[in-house]
Amino acid sequence: MVPILIFLFILFNITLREFRRLPAFSGHQGPPTYPLIGCLVPFYKNRNRLLDWYTHLLSHSPTLTIVLRRLGTPTTIVTANPQNVEYILKTNFNNFPKGKPFTDILGDFLGHGIFNVDGELWQTRRKLACHEFTSRSSGDFVEHTLEEEVNERLVPVLESLSKRNQIVDLQDLLGRFSFNVICKFTIGINMCCLDPSSPISPLARAFDVASEISARRGAAPLFLIWKMKRWLGVGSERKLREAVEEVRSHVMEMIRDRKKKMKAREEAGDEDLLSRLVCAGQQEEAIRDMMISFILAGRDTTAAALTWFFWLISHHPETEHRIVKETEDKTGDSLDYESLKNLEFLKACLCESMRLYPPVAWDSKHAIADDLLPDGTRVRAGDKVTYFPYGMGRMEALWGKEWFEFRPDRWFIETDENKRNKVSAFKCPTFQAGPRTCLGKEMAFIQMKYVLASILRRFKIRAVSQDKPIFVPFLTAHMAGGLKVLVSKRVNPP
């Protein structure tokens, strides 16, 4: 009898606590919510389409914000309101760190890398990373990395595919390519063969497994399930542990090998990021976590953005023609840093593509103290606050009735010079905004421009299927089943 009374007492207190956490402002449109379990039932029913479910709920909310409560998780506030996004990411930045619930999800994989820490440790990592990104100019990145990887590896593969009229999974190919580029930048070596018939490298495969399972943790209806599986060491959590061990083992081996070589040569070794971090005297674990974070971000985000871009362009030949013409007019025979900066229409196309298919679909913070968002949403200490780039790109209130159309011209101001419109980063937070703005933003645009200009001036890329692909939000966006394409030579290449 006593245990039953204790259980009922606990149940009553949990229910009372949840009711007390109801916000004073009621202008939100959210899912059906019940005592104790909250919106667990509709959440579970929509667990395989959370992006579209959230987007639907947000589009019917007067404030572009929804509040979700479900058993076993903190109250979650999801917003597509740019004023809220600016408040979270900039105005009251210090009250919205990633928080322990977030870092717990990715901690096994990313450790104490820059994307998974807060406070003083984040500031230290940020300063170090900022120095490393600015110490190597974007011009050097183009000259020493992109030229070699594109012209000596990627283009020959596409040339071979076009001659054989062979269907290829472009998402896989771009993933291999991006993995090589970021590995060349960070550790100075290639890690993947671009030949589609060759197996992907063990390190790249381990990254895939670790990132997918880590992402599934964040979308789990009940966090207790994955935590229990991790404690028992079974199922997906066992696979995650094995994948993380493989990633860390590879990276640590590279770090120690680099130390030995640099000591033997008695050189400072400033060719790549790894060498500079070793020279700076950083601890091995700190270097390892930094390397894993940079490789993950540099590989997956650009590959995802390029994959969705090629799918869109294959359905908009007139836009493709404008890109090719701009490339011919503004770059001539060579692609250098200065000419790439002038490709404004191509950049607008990339921005428009990432508006519809952002490489990172959502990102969450956890409030330290009670707060009030600009739209009147009350936030309690410990609440999870999620800004939602995928949904923001689909809000009629932000982009008009034609939000679903691929229209790069929306990024231009209607003037005689047709200047590109500087859309607020808080309206389209593809690269975050505020103090945590992505350090690699400029480098990502340069890389994507170089790849697209190099490919589109030589080849036509056409999707084999006309069906709309499924957007899968792992840590970064993926196209379910890949992107099967045919590659053909352009008739009049420059």
Image: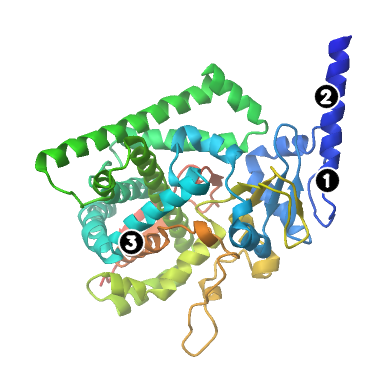
Side of 189 relative to 291 (left or right): left
- Amino acid type at mark 3: Thr
Work out how far the residue at label 2 is from the one at label 3, CA to CA, in angstroms. 54 Å
Quadrant of image for the N terminus:
top right
> Which numbered disc, 2 or 3, marks the residue that appears first in the sequence?
2
Q: Secondary structure at mark 3?
A: helix
Q: Position of residue 114 (x, y in %)?
A: 44, 46
Work out how far the residue at label 3 is from the one at label 1, CA to CA, in angstroms. 46 Å
Side of 161 relative to 77 (left or right): left
- Amino acid type at mark 2: Ile
In the rendered image, which quarter is residue 197 located in? Answer: top left
> Which numbered disc, 3 or 1, marks the residue that appears first in the sequence?
1
Q: Residue 493, labelled with which disc?
A: none
Q: Position of residue 28 (x, y in %)?
A: 80, 54
Please tell me whether residue 487 is drawn above or below residue 35 in the rendered image.
below
Please tell me whether residue 84 is drawn above or below residue 189 in the rendered image.
below
The residue where tag 2 is placed is 10
Q: Position of residue 242 (x, y in %)?
A: 41, 25
Q: Secondary structure at mark 2?
A: helix
Between residue 99 and residue 433, name the one nearer to us. 99
| Pointer 2 with pointer 3, Cβ within 8 A | no
In the rendered image, which quarter is residue 296 located in? Answer: top left
The residue where tag 3 is placed is 134
Residue most extreme to the top:
1
Residue most extreme to the left:
265
Q: Position of residue 347 (x, y in %)?
A: 43, 69
